[in-house]
Image: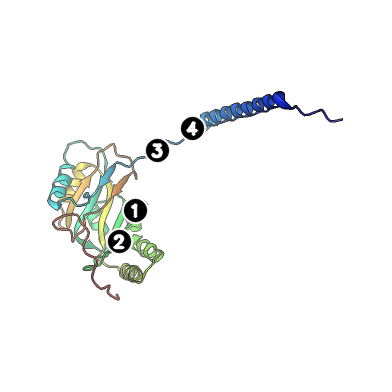
């Protein structure tokens, strides 16, 4: 015969005791798991290369120049921004043999907003030069939701495939002395370096676009999109 189930006050007390025991075991399990598998520390990207939104260009250029001051030889992450866009094939002319980690592309179209496309690259100048193909492929795979954005997507991808002079920024790593040498080259508008203790790949990048002359602000987006 089955044992009689507890009823009344005694049964209610036993059920409450069972719930309390289960809760205690659950808390203990969470504590043990938390000790065995500690949570990852949050990564907060506070460093930034490039002008702030709306920053006067003259202020940014002065700030970038100041970032290269110092006599230490510690390597730093830095952003090259160009006077005019260059083709991917010309990147080695401006890198000084330093380690390149990112290429930024922007297809400038009068009165048409187009995206900045950032392509991370492994070591080696050949990878940097070939990154234009990745930029075109990335643009081609971008989802669009209206006729204008589709036209912009197709235009940007087509010009990148054609090898346009659309490289506007290069992120690389080197000591201040070598970065100052790069900054003095014709065609380089600014070189801005992060502090030596900045973590790799944990910083924002926004190149100064060649068409931004007074302030780092987006241009109008009210013009027709060219077919090619």
Question: How busy is the neighbourhood of tag 2: few (under 14 within 10 Å), some, or many (20 plus)?
Answer: few
- Contact check, label 1 and label 2, Cβ < 8 Å: no
User: How far apart in space, not on screen, are marks 3 and 4 (Cα)?
Assistant: 12 Å
- Contact check, label 1 and label 4, Cβ < 8 Å: no
Q: Earlier in the sequence, mark 1 or mark 4?
A: 4
Q: Nearer the viewer, mark 1 or mark 2?
A: 2
Say which residue appears at 18% left-offset and 51% top-offset: 190
Say which residue appears at 63% left-offset and 29% top-offset: 19
The front one of 25 and 120 is 25
Say which residue appears at 37% left-offset and 64% top-offset: 139
Q: Earlier in the sequence, mark 2 or mark 4?
A: 4
The residue to which callout 4 is attached is 38
Question: How busy is the neighbourhood of tag 4: few (under 14 within 10 Å), some, or many (20 plus)?
Answer: few
Which of the numbered marks, if any, corresponds to residue 124? 1
Helix, strand, or loop for circle 2?
Answer: loop
User: How far apart in space, not on screen, are marks 2 and 4 (Cα)?
Assistant: 39 Å
User: How far apart in space, not on screen, are marks 1 and 2 (Cα)?
Assistant: 26 Å
The residue to which callout 3 is attached is 42
Q: Position of residue 149 (x, y in %)?
A: 34, 67
């Amino acid at each position: 015969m089955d044992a009689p189930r507890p009823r009344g006050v005694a049964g209610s007390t036993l059920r409450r005791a069972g719930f309390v025991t289960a809760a205690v075991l659950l808390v203990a399990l969470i504590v043990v798991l938390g000790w065995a598998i500690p949570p990852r520390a949050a990564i907060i990207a506070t460093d930034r290369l490039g002008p702030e939104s709306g920053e006067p260009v003259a202020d940014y250029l002065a700030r970038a120049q100041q970032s290269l001051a110092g006599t230490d030889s510690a390597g730093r992450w830095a952003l090259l921004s160009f006077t005019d866009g260059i083709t991917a094939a010309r990147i080695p002319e401006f890198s000084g043999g330093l380690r390149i980690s990112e290429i930024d592309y922007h297809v400038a179209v009068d009165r048409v907003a187009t995206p900045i496309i950032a392509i991370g690259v492994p070591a080696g100048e050949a990878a940097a030069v070939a990154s234009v193909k990745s930029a075109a492929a990335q643009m081609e795979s971008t989802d669009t939701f209206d006729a204008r954005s589709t036209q912009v997507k197709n235009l940007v991808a087509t010009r990148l495939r054609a090898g346009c002079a659309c490289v506007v920024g290069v992120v690389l790593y080197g000591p201040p002395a070598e970065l100052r040498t790069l900054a003095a080259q014709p065609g380089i508008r600014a070189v801005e370096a992060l502090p030596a203790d900045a973590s790799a790949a944990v910083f924002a990048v926004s190149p100064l676009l060649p068409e931004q002359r007074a302030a780092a602000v987006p241009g109008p987006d009210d013009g027709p999109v060219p077919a090619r």
